[in-house]
Image (tube, rainbow, N blue to C red):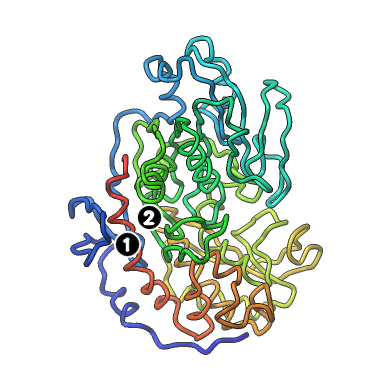
Amino acid sequence: MNQPASRPTARQDAEVARPGRRRILASLGALPAGAVLASAGAAAAAPGGKWKGKGNTTHGDFRLGVENLLEPETLETLRDARVGLITNPTGTDRELRSTIDLLVEAEDAGGFTMAALFGPEHGVRGAEPAGGSVGDYIDEKTGLPVRSLYGATQKPTPEMIADVDVLIFDIQDIGTRFYTYIWTMYYAMEAAGENGKRFLVLDRPNPLGADIEGFVLEPELSSFVGLREIPQTHGLTVGELAQLFNGEFLDGAVTLEVIAMSGYDADDPAAADLPWVLPSPNIPTPDTAVVYAGTGLIESLNISEGRGTTTPFLWFGAPFITESQVAAIIAELQAAELPGVLYRPMSATPISSKHAGEFCGGLQLHVTDPVAYEPVRTGIHVLAALLRTVEEVDWREGEDCRTEEDVCWIDKLSGTKRTRAMLEAGDSPEAIVAAWEREAQRFFATTQSYRLY
């Protein structure tokens, strides 16, 4: 499925002359109804269309939302409430004490009752693989009922939350539209609004910071890997995202409270210096979280995205990729001068998922500067290089992904059929990036009234 090379775009030529990583956003053009724009000094953009949030906002020592909730005056807001907690292993304080345990221990002091736990994909304790079935059960440690929000029931039913007054959400997101935890939150918020329940979000850092990349989801491609109209990287914390969901999509129907972090810098989330708890089995390291928004697109191809290896999403390959093709792909990526990343040839044999048990040629990404790295832009360059260089590379659906009417995994992941159409037409990766920039600008403007940091 080789694609013809295309000529550099005017945008690529302009990149050369653009000084530095950031530039002040002078104008956003025509804005959508209801959009709120921050001052020009708070708005900046990076080459490749990464629209920046306010950033550089610190308020003393860093504290997580859960840690601020446990302050006596804040905990008092739960008095007399029956609490349901939506969480997974990432729900901890800085000392890695589980939010489940912290809330159970705080019941007497706060005068509330823990009523139930709710588990997203991979479960409350995180033991299930991607797409694995998660059923209802009793949590062995606490004796609390655990109700599944993945699989047959993604939105809490009235019966599931009948014995709950307040739903609390405490899960580490990784800033990517097709990471399902934010849609668990969305459905739970929707259910809370419909059933008169309070919804409380314990805020956490976004590993991608405030950067925005990618097309805004087209509604006809809505699925659990992209439910509502946000870009591929949304640049918001889960608390900010909950406020946006409530304001833009749920008509303010949710009684929403966000327990914000203290001392958080949206432009440097790593400064929080938190121990990394893998949010799902194939996001084992912070570097994986940084690249996933882009290399996750490789799921749409017939090559391995690294599942079943020790470097998921940092490595990709297939049995039919040769050493010379790897060298050609690396040369093309190096020529693109993408910031914050290096490449090296690497072979691997996945033990599960695509090409399990087969020796695969491929390459590994090494993130050298997470702040400068542009995951979606890099991911588009990777897809384009693979399609141009390796004849056998194809969409994972094969013959079932050939027409505009087909709905392919690349369409759902990228949120549009334009990505597939442009790649197949041989358009340059930078042309694809340029195509989403105006959408990113508009979304950036819309987010300003919902940002907390």
Q: Which residue is mark 2?
A: 211
Quadrant in which the N terminus is drawn: bottom right
Q: Are the residues at dot 2 and dot 1 in contact (C-beta closer than 8 Å)?
A: yes
Residue 444 x, y percent position in the rendering = 31, 56
> Depth check: 294 or 161 in front?
161
- What residue is shown at x 42% (from left), y 42% (from top)? 242
**Left or right of residue 31: residue 333:** right
Q: Residue at x 37, y 67 (%)?
A: 48
Q: Camera-side residue: 233 or 191?
A: 191
- Which quadrant of the figure contains the C terminus? top left
Instruction: Check disc 1 and report the residue beneath it.
Output: 46
* Residue toward you, 59 or 224: 224
Q: Give the residue type that dot 2 points to.
A: Asp
Residue 345 located left or right of residue 443: right
At label 1, counting other C-alpha atoms closer than 10 Å, the crowd grade (few under 14, some 14-19, many 20 or more) is: some
Q: Could you tell me residue 177's position as x and y percent?
A: 49, 55
Question: Furthest residue to the right?
Answer: 357
Seen in the picture, residue 277 relative to 76 is either above or below; the reply is below
Give neighbour class at mark 2: few <14, some 14-19, many 20+ (Cα, 10 Å).
Answer: many
| Residue type (three-letter) at the residue carrying disc 1 | Ala
